[in-house]
Amino acid sequence: MVHRHRVSTRLVLIGLLALSGLLAETGPAAAQSAARLYTVEDVPVDVTAGSAVAAREQAYEEGQRAAFRLLLQKLTPESVHGRLPATPSGAAFDALVQGFEVRDERSSGVRYIARMVVRFNPAEVQALLARTDLPTVTMASQPVLVLPLWQSPEAGLLLWDDPNPWRDAWARVALGQALVPVIVPLADAADLVGISAEQAAAGDRERLAAMARRYGAVASLVAVAKPAESEGKQALDIRFTRYDSAGEPETHSERVTAPAGETGTELQARAVRQVSSRLDASWKNAAAVRPGLENRISVITAVSGLDEWAALRRKLAEIGMIRRQNLVSLSRGEAEIVLWYAGQPEQLRAALAQRGLSLTNDPSASVGAVWRLSLQ
């Protein structure tokens, strides 16, 4: 009787897993991520023509085409920007665009000014890039928590204390187009006891990891800014270090100098965008994959029930480089899954880590390589 109950439960579980759709299926979170990745915001248009209507129509066309060039640059490493495909025309270009919005529009008798948000079709864009054989990013990074440290000449190193113009700049500057979203902490009581300026500057891994977990971030970025002067112009010396859950910290340093007429607030905002750009460049170098490249890996993962399986499947579906997933076998407490993915094994491992998953080789396996997929 007990034996029949076990078999029945296992068969029901297999049936429910099959009904839930084992092949990679894009869920709401994955769809939202793709929509953000293939959206270009804040595209300025300013057109003068024979009439307001003609200027508006020309602005719409020019704005969409400008947004497409920005999208290609966003999805590819800078090293290949000189080989980006030409912008299609006519119906071929219309197929790339899903829609657009217009904001802050102004017009006169012959002039039209606005800012546009253009959304592109992910499948069409990827098909175009596939024909060029260029490495392409297929997913955005998970958020990174930034801890902005201001090296004040008078007060020393500041994080939570005011005034901290560097923290204010990170909170103020919009980075909606970034491939690596950034979270600025609230500076509430929990933050104040969670980590100090000195602990952040020293790279306290345990406290930095705890802060990242609190905000649902995949890593912490300690960004130190110090006022400086370069040839009589105000400048900022920036040093930023990224701390991930695994691997060694990565530190970069640079000086950002203000051109004539730029205020300190504008300089700080530009420095924030420059650091964000560096994060994006690192992400593209790590995550960009060539079209048509596909590898296969078989993994073993623990499965304690349908809820755990559904959560795992959602995480896998959110990873753009995973093209397909398929259940091979199910035993008590474990499942074997085959993943087909674009890119290299180390890129897959990094992408899984972004979703809180760890891919490791099981040293206890008696025959061959056995890969285990588990929650970090």
Image (cartoon, helix red, strand yellow):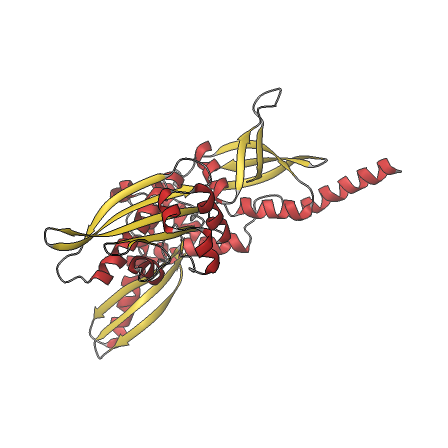
In the rendered image, the vertical position of residue 56 relative to residue 290, given as above or below = below
The residue positioned farthest toward the left in the image shown:
231
The residue located at (31%, 59%) in the rendering is: 164
Q: Is residue 286 left or right of residue 10?
A: left
Quadrant in which the C terminus is drawn: top right
How many discs appear?
Answer: 0
In the rendered image, the vertical position of residue 173 relative to residue 315, given as above or below = below
Q: Is residue 357 left or right of residue 347?
A: right
The residue located at (17%, 61%) in the rendering is: 262
Quadrant in which the N terminus is drawn: top right
The residue positioned farthest toward the right in the image shown:
1
**Residue placed most toward the observer, 17 or 213:** 213
**Residue placed most toward the observer, 130 or 323:** 323
Residue 30 percent coordinates (x, y) = 51, 52
Residue 134 showing in the rendered view: no
In the rendered image, the vertical position of residue 241 relative to residue 33, given as above or below = above
